[in-house]
Amino acid sequence: MSTKTKILEKNGISKSPQASVWIRAFTSTSDWPDKEEFLDVIYWARQALGIILGIVWGLLPLEGFLGIMLFVLINAGVIYFYFSNFQNIDEEEYGGAWELTKEGFMTSFAGFLVTWIIIYSGLYHDVDKLST
Amino acid sequence: MWADTLLIVFISICTALLGEGLTWLMVYRTEKYQKLKAEVEKQSKKLEKRKETHGDLLDKQHKKKIEREEERLKNNNRDLSFVKMKSMFAIGFAFTALLSMFNSIFDGRVVARLPFEPLPWIQGLSHRNLPGEDYYDCSFIFCIFCVPCQYGRISRKCWVLHLPGLLPNKETAFLAQHRANLNNYNVYYLYKFC
Protein backbone atom coordinates (compact mmCIF):
# COMPACT_ATOMS: atom_id res chain seq x y z
CA MET A 1 0.00 0.00 0.00
CA SER A 2 1.39 3.35 -0.91
CA THR A 3 2.30 5.91 1.74
CA LYS A 4 -0.29 8.36 0.39
CA THR A 5 -3.14 5.87 0.78
CA LYS A 6 -1.96 5.07 4.29
CA ILE A 7 -2.02 8.74 5.22
CA LEU A 8 -5.52 9.13 3.75
CA GLU A 9 -6.80 6.17 5.73
CA LYS A 10 -5.15 7.50 8.85
CA ASN A 11 -6.96 10.80 8.41
CA GLY A 12 -10.30 9.02 8.08
CA ILE A 13 -10.67 9.68 4.36
CA SER A 14 -12.26 6.94 2.24
CA LYS A 15 -10.08 4.44 0.41
CA SER A 16 -12.20 4.39 -2.76
CA PRO A 17 -11.62 7.18 -5.29
CA GLN A 18 -14.14 10.02 -4.83
CA ALA A 19 -15.85 12.10 -7.50
CA SER A 20 -14.76 15.75 -7.57
CA VAL A 21 -16.24 18.13 -5.02
CA TRP A 22 -18.14 19.96 -7.78
CA ILE A 23 -19.92 16.79 -8.92
CA ARG A 24 -20.72 15.71 -5.35
CA ALA A 25 -21.97 19.20 -4.47
CA PHE A 26 -24.59 19.02 -7.22
CA THR A 27 -25.46 15.34 -6.72
CA SER A 28 -28.15 14.41 -4.24
CA THR A 29 -27.16 12.41 -1.11
CA SER A 30 -23.44 12.41 -1.91
CA ASP A 31 -20.86 10.85 0.37
CA TRP A 32 -18.81 13.37 2.40
CA PRO A 33 -16.03 11.50 4.24
CA ASP A 34 -14.10 14.73 4.83
CA LYS A 35 -16.35 16.98 6.89
CA GLU A 36 -14.24 20.06 6.23
CA GLU A 37 -14.89 19.60 2.52
CA PHE A 38 -18.65 19.68 3.00
CA LEU A 39 -18.35 22.77 5.21
CA ASP A 40 -16.38 24.41 2.39
CA VAL A 41 -19.19 23.62 -0.06
CA ILE A 42 -21.74 25.17 2.31
CA TYR A 43 -19.49 28.19 2.80
CA TRP A 44 -18.89 28.92 -0.89
CA ALA A 45 -22.50 28.21 -1.84
CA ARG A 46 -23.45 30.80 0.74
CA GLN A 47 -21.01 33.38 -0.63
CA ALA A 48 -22.36 32.89 -4.17
CA LEU A 49 -25.93 33.13 -2.90
CA GLY A 50 -25.10 36.32 -0.97
CA ILE A 51 -23.64 38.03 -4.04
CA ILE A 52 -26.48 36.88 -6.33
CA LEU A 53 -29.12 38.11 -3.86
CA GLY A 54 -27.19 41.39 -3.50
CA ILE A 55 -27.28 41.93 -7.27
CA VAL A 56 -31.00 41.04 -7.52
CA TRP A 57 -31.95 43.23 -4.53
CA GLY A 58 -29.93 46.12 -6.04
CA LEU A 59 -31.53 45.76 -9.47
CA LEU A 60 -35.15 45.50 -8.23
CA PRO A 61 -34.49 47.67 -6.05
CA LEU A 62 -35.51 46.33 -2.64
CA GLU A 63 -35.22 48.79 0.23
CA GLY A 64 -35.30 48.81 4.02
CA PHE A 65 -35.15 46.02 6.54
CA LEU A 66 -37.48 43.96 4.36
CA GLY A 67 -34.47 43.41 2.08
CA ILE A 68 -32.28 42.28 4.97
CA MET A 69 -34.96 40.02 6.45
CA LEU A 70 -35.67 38.42 3.07
CA PHE A 71 -31.93 37.81 2.61
CA VAL A 72 -31.63 36.15 6.03
CA LEU A 73 -34.67 33.94 5.41
CA ILE A 74 -33.71 32.89 1.88
CA ASN A 75 -30.04 32.35 2.77
CA ALA A 76 -30.78 30.21 5.83
CA GLY A 77 -33.70 28.42 4.14
CA VAL A 78 -31.80 27.46 1.00
CA ILE A 79 -28.82 26.16 2.96
CA TYR A 80 -31.07 24.25 5.38
CA PHE A 81 -32.92 22.66 2.47
CA TYR A 82 -29.58 21.82 0.78
CA PHE A 83 -28.05 19.92 3.68
CA SER A 84 -31.18 18.36 5.16
CA ASN A 85 -33.24 17.44 2.07
CA PHE A 86 -30.83 17.44 -0.88
CA GLN A 87 -27.69 16.00 0.71
CA ASN A 88 -29.41 14.22 3.64
CA ILE A 89 -26.50 14.93 5.94
CA ASP A 90 -26.46 13.69 9.52
CA GLU A 91 -26.50 17.10 11.21
CA GLU A 92 -25.18 15.74 14.51
CA GLU A 93 -21.83 14.92 12.88
CA TYR A 94 -21.39 18.65 12.29
CA GLY A 95 -22.57 19.78 15.71
CA GLY A 96 -26.27 20.18 14.86
CA ALA A 97 -28.37 21.98 12.25
CA TRP A 98 -27.65 25.36 13.82
CA GLU A 99 -23.88 25.01 13.27
CA LEU A 100 -24.43 24.28 9.58
CA THR A 101 -27.05 27.01 9.20
CA LYS A 102 -24.68 29.66 10.54
CA GLU A 103 -21.54 28.38 8.73
CA GLY A 104 -20.20 31.37 6.75
CA PHE A 105 -23.33 33.45 7.37
CA MET A 106 -21.61 36.68 8.39
CA THR A 107 -19.20 36.70 5.44
CA SER A 108 -22.12 36.00 3.12
CA PHE A 109 -24.01 38.89 4.72
CA ALA A 110 -21.02 41.22 4.20
CA GLY A 111 -20.78 40.20 0.52
CA PHE A 112 -24.54 40.71 0.12
CA LEU A 113 -24.38 44.19 1.70
CA VAL A 114 -21.49 45.33 -0.49
CA THR A 115 -23.12 44.22 -3.77
CA TRP A 116 -26.57 45.48 -2.76
CA ILE A 117 -25.22 48.91 -1.76
CA ILE A 118 -22.96 49.29 -4.83
CA ILE A 119 -25.66 48.36 -7.35
CA TYR A 120 -28.43 50.24 -5.59
CA SER A 121 -26.51 53.49 -5.27
CA GLY A 122 -24.90 53.12 -8.72
CA LEU A 123 -28.20 52.66 -10.52
CA TYR A 124 -30.65 54.74 -8.53
CA HIS A 125 -28.67 57.67 -7.11
CA ASP A 126 -26.67 59.97 -9.31
CA VAL A 127 -23.36 61.66 -8.54
CA ASP A 128 -24.75 65.18 -8.05
CA LYS A 129 -27.12 63.98 -5.36
CA LEU A 130 -24.38 62.19 -3.48
CA SER A 131 -21.34 64.47 -3.57
CA THR A 132 -22.14 67.25 -1.16
CA MET B 1 -20.48 57.20 -8.09
CA TRP B 2 -19.51 53.82 -9.55
CA ALA B 3 -15.89 54.94 -9.62
CA ASP B 4 -15.80 55.87 -5.93
CA THR B 5 -17.44 52.70 -4.63
CA LEU B 6 -15.50 50.38 -6.91
CA LEU B 7 -12.25 52.15 -5.97
CA ILE B 8 -13.07 51.63 -2.29
CA VAL B 9 -13.80 47.94 -2.83
CA PHE B 10 -10.51 47.64 -4.75
CA ILE B 11 -8.59 49.39 -1.95
CA SER B 12 -10.21 47.15 0.60
CA ILE B 13 -9.30 43.99 -1.32
CA CYS B 14 -5.70 45.23 -1.70
CA THR B 15 -5.49 46.01 2.02
CA ALA B 16 -6.81 42.56 2.93
CA LEU B 17 -4.36 40.91 0.54
CA LEU B 18 -1.51 43.00 1.96
CA GLY B 19 -2.48 41.82 5.44
CA GLU B 20 -2.48 38.21 4.27
CA GLY B 21 0.89 38.71 2.57
CA LEU B 22 2.41 40.24 5.70
CA THR B 23 1.05 37.43 7.85
CA TRP B 24 2.48 34.86 5.45
CA LEU B 25 5.86 36.60 5.57
CA MET B 26 5.95 36.99 9.32
CA VAL B 27 4.07 33.91 10.50
CA TYR B 28 2.93 31.17 8.17
CA ARG B 29 6.20 30.63 6.33
CA THR B 30 8.36 30.64 9.48
CA GLU B 31 9.86 27.38 10.62
CA LYS B 32 8.59 27.88 14.16
CA TYR B 33 4.97 28.23 13.04
CA GLN B 34 5.17 25.22 10.72
CA LYS B 35 6.71 23.12 13.47
CA LEU B 36 4.12 24.16 16.06
CA LYS B 37 1.28 23.65 13.59
CA ALA B 38 2.47 20.13 12.74
CA GLU B 39 2.88 19.37 16.43
CA VAL B 40 -0.63 20.57 17.32
CA GLU B 41 -2.17 18.60 14.45
CA LYS B 42 -0.28 15.47 15.43
CA GLN B 43 -1.23 15.80 19.09
CA SER B 44 -4.90 16.44 18.28
CA LYS B 45 -5.12 13.32 16.13
CA LYS B 46 -3.33 11.25 18.74
CA LEU B 47 -5.65 12.49 21.45
CA GLU B 48 -8.73 11.87 19.35
CA LYS B 49 -7.57 8.36 18.49
CA ARG B 50 -6.83 7.57 22.12
CA LYS B 51 -10.27 8.78 23.19
CA GLU B 52 -11.97 6.78 20.43
CA THR B 53 -10.09 3.61 21.36
CA HIS B 54 -10.84 3.77 25.04
CA GLY B 55 -14.26 5.46 24.89
CA ASP B 56 -15.81 6.05 28.29
CA LEU B 57 -14.01 3.12 29.89
CA LEU B 58 -10.96 5.06 31.01
CA ASP B 59 -8.92 3.98 33.97
CA LYS B 60 -6.99 6.45 36.11
CA GLN B 61 -3.73 5.93 34.23
CA HIS B 62 -5.30 6.64 30.85
CA LYS B 63 -7.18 9.61 32.19
CA LYS B 64 -3.95 11.07 33.49
CA LYS B 65 -2.24 10.47 30.17
CA ILE B 66 -5.04 12.19 28.28
CA GLU B 67 -4.98 15.13 30.66
CA ARG B 68 -1.22 15.47 30.18
CA GLU B 69 -1.64 15.46 26.41
CA GLU B 70 -4.43 18.01 26.59
CA GLU B 71 -2.21 20.23 28.67
CA ARG B 72 0.62 19.91 26.15
CA LEU B 73 -1.78 20.72 23.33
CA LYS B 74 -2.94 23.84 25.15
CA ASN B 75 0.65 24.95 25.68
CA ASN B 76 1.48 24.49 22.02
CA ASN B 77 -1.61 26.43 21.05
CA ARG B 78 -0.54 29.25 23.36
CA ASP B 79 2.88 29.27 21.68
CA LEU B 80 1.14 29.54 18.30
CA SER B 81 -0.70 32.62 19.52
CA PHE B 82 2.60 34.19 20.62
CA VAL B 83 4.12 33.59 17.18
CA LYS B 84 1.14 35.40 15.70
CA MET B 85 1.29 38.28 18.14
CA LYS B 86 4.33 40.09 16.68
CA SER B 87 2.80 40.16 13.20
CA MET B 88 -0.38 41.63 14.67
CA PHE B 89 1.51 44.75 15.73
CA ALA B 90 3.19 45.19 12.35
CA ILE B 91 -0.06 44.67 10.44
CA GLY B 92 -1.91 46.97 12.81
CA PHE B 93 0.60 49.71 12.20
CA ALA B 94 0.52 49.27 8.40
CA PHE B 95 -3.29 49.21 8.32
CA THR B 96 -3.62 52.28 10.48
CA ALA B 97 -1.20 54.21 8.24
CA LEU B 98 -2.98 53.12 5.05
CA LEU B 99 -6.44 53.87 6.38
CA SER B 100 -5.37 57.29 7.64
CA MET B 101 -4.19 58.07 4.12
CA PHE B 102 -7.43 56.94 2.48
CA ASN B 103 -9.44 58.61 5.18
CA SER B 104 -7.91 61.96 4.22
CA ILE B 105 -8.99 61.38 0.57
CA PHE B 106 -12.57 60.25 1.22
CA ASP B 107 -13.28 62.06 4.48
CA GLY B 108 -16.62 63.91 4.41
CA ARG B 109 -17.59 62.43 1.03
CA VAL B 110 -20.80 60.48 0.46
CA VAL B 111 -19.61 57.47 -1.51
CA ALA B 112 -22.84 55.45 -1.62
CA ARG B 113 -26.53 55.52 -0.78
CA LEU B 114 -27.72 52.84 1.63
CA PRO B 115 -30.94 51.03 0.66
CA PHE B 116 -31.89 50.83 4.36
CA GLU B 117 -31.63 53.03 7.42
CA PRO B 118 -28.81 51.64 9.56
CA LEU B 119 -29.37 50.87 13.23
CA PRO B 120 -28.28 53.69 15.58
CA TRP B 121 -25.16 51.84 16.74
CA ILE B 122 -23.99 51.38 13.12
CA GLN B 123 -24.69 54.99 12.16
CA GLY B 124 -21.42 56.09 13.75
CA LEU B 125 -19.65 53.97 11.16
CA SER B 126 -21.92 54.43 8.14
CA HIS B 127 -22.31 58.20 8.60
CA ARG B 128 -18.82 58.91 9.89
CA ASN B 129 -17.76 62.56 9.32
CA LEU B 130 -20.59 63.15 6.85
CA PRO B 131 -22.56 66.41 6.87
CA GLY B 132 -26.31 66.42 7.50
CA GLU B 133 -28.69 64.07 9.24
CA ASP B 134 -29.55 61.82 6.30
CA TYR B 135 -28.43 58.44 7.63
CA TYR B 136 -28.98 56.77 4.26
CA ASP B 137 -25.76 58.45 3.11
CA CYS B 138 -22.80 56.14 3.42
CA SER B 139 -19.20 57.00 4.28
CA PHE B 140 -16.21 55.17 2.83
CA ILE B 141 -15.31 53.51 6.12
CA PHE B 142 -18.52 51.40 6.09
CA CYS B 143 -17.82 50.05 2.59
CA ILE B 144 -14.20 49.35 3.41
CA PHE B 145 -15.28 47.59 6.61
CA CYS B 146 -17.48 45.01 4.84
CA VAL B 147 -14.96 43.66 2.33
CA PRO B 148 -12.15 42.11 4.46
CA CYS B 149 -14.72 39.80 6.05
CA GLN B 150 -14.59 37.84 2.80
CA TYR B 151 -11.01 36.69 2.99
CA GLY B 152 -10.90 34.77 6.25
CA ARG B 153 -11.81 31.44 4.75
CA ILE B 154 -9.28 31.67 1.91
CA SER B 155 -6.41 32.20 4.31
CA ARG B 156 -7.76 29.53 6.64
CA LYS B 157 -7.90 27.10 3.72
CA CYS B 158 -4.36 27.91 2.60
CA TRP B 159 -2.36 28.34 5.75
CA VAL B 160 -4.05 27.61 8.99
CA LEU B 161 -4.77 24.37 10.84
CA HIS B 162 -6.79 21.82 8.92
CA LEU B 163 -7.90 18.88 11.00
CA PRO B 164 -10.04 16.48 8.95
CA GLY B 165 -12.50 14.37 10.87
CA LEU B 166 -11.95 16.21 14.12
CA LEU B 167 -14.80 18.63 14.34
CA PRO B 168 -16.58 19.70 16.34
CA ASN B 169 -15.44 18.50 19.78
CA LYS B 170 -14.04 19.82 23.02
CA GLU B 171 -10.40 19.22 22.12
CA THR B 172 -10.49 21.19 18.90
CA ALA B 173 -12.72 23.99 20.16
CA PHE B 174 -9.79 26.17 21.18
CA LEU B 175 -8.01 25.42 17.89
CA ALA B 176 -11.08 26.58 16.03
CA GLN B 177 -11.01 29.71 18.16
CA HIS B 178 -7.34 30.16 17.27
CA ARG B 179 -8.17 29.88 13.56
CA ALA B 180 -10.95 32.42 13.92
CA ASN B 181 -8.57 34.81 15.70
CA LEU B 182 -5.98 34.49 12.95
CA ASN B 183 -8.52 35.16 10.24
CA ASN B 184 -10.25 38.11 11.80
CA TYR B 185 -7.26 40.27 12.60
CA ASN B 186 -7.73 42.66 9.68
CA VAL B 187 -11.38 43.25 10.54
CA TYR B 188 -10.24 43.86 14.11
CA TYR B 189 -7.77 46.53 13.04
CA LEU B 190 -10.30 48.24 10.84
CA TYR B 191 -12.67 48.28 13.80
CA LYS B 192 -9.96 49.68 16.10
CA PHE B 193 -9.16 52.33 13.57
CA CYS B 194 -12.77 53.44 13.38
Image (cartoon, coloured by chain):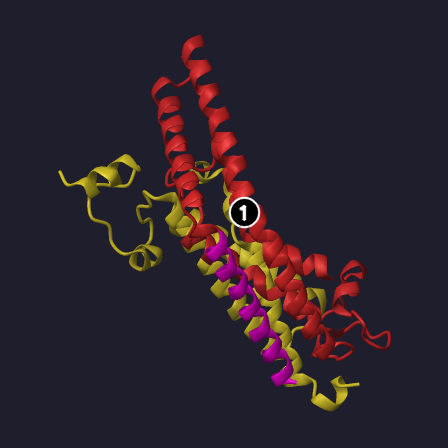
Chain colours: A yellow, B red
Which residue is at 66% across, 61% downward? B190
Tell me where the magenta segment starts and ends, as one range. B1-26
Image quadrant assignment for residue A94: top left
Image quadrant assignment for residue B49: top left
- Frontmost residue, A45 versus B75: B75
Quadrant showing the C terminus of chain B: bottom right
Q: Is residue A27 magenta-colored? A: no
Image quadrant assignment for residue B10: bottom right
For label 1, the residue is B84
Is A84 placed above or below B10 here?
Answer: above
Coordinates of residue A65 in the picture (x, y in percent): 71, 64
Horizontally, residue B46 falls left or right of residue A74, namely left
Horizontally, residue B150 falls left or right of residue B45, namely right
Quadrant showing the N terminus of chain B: bottom right
Coordinates of residue B144 in the picture (x, y in percent): 64, 69
The residue lying furthest to the right in this view is B132
Is B12 placed above or below B34 here?
Answer: below
Which residue is at 45% across, 51% downward? B28
Coordinates of residue B74 in the picture (x, y in percent): 51, 30
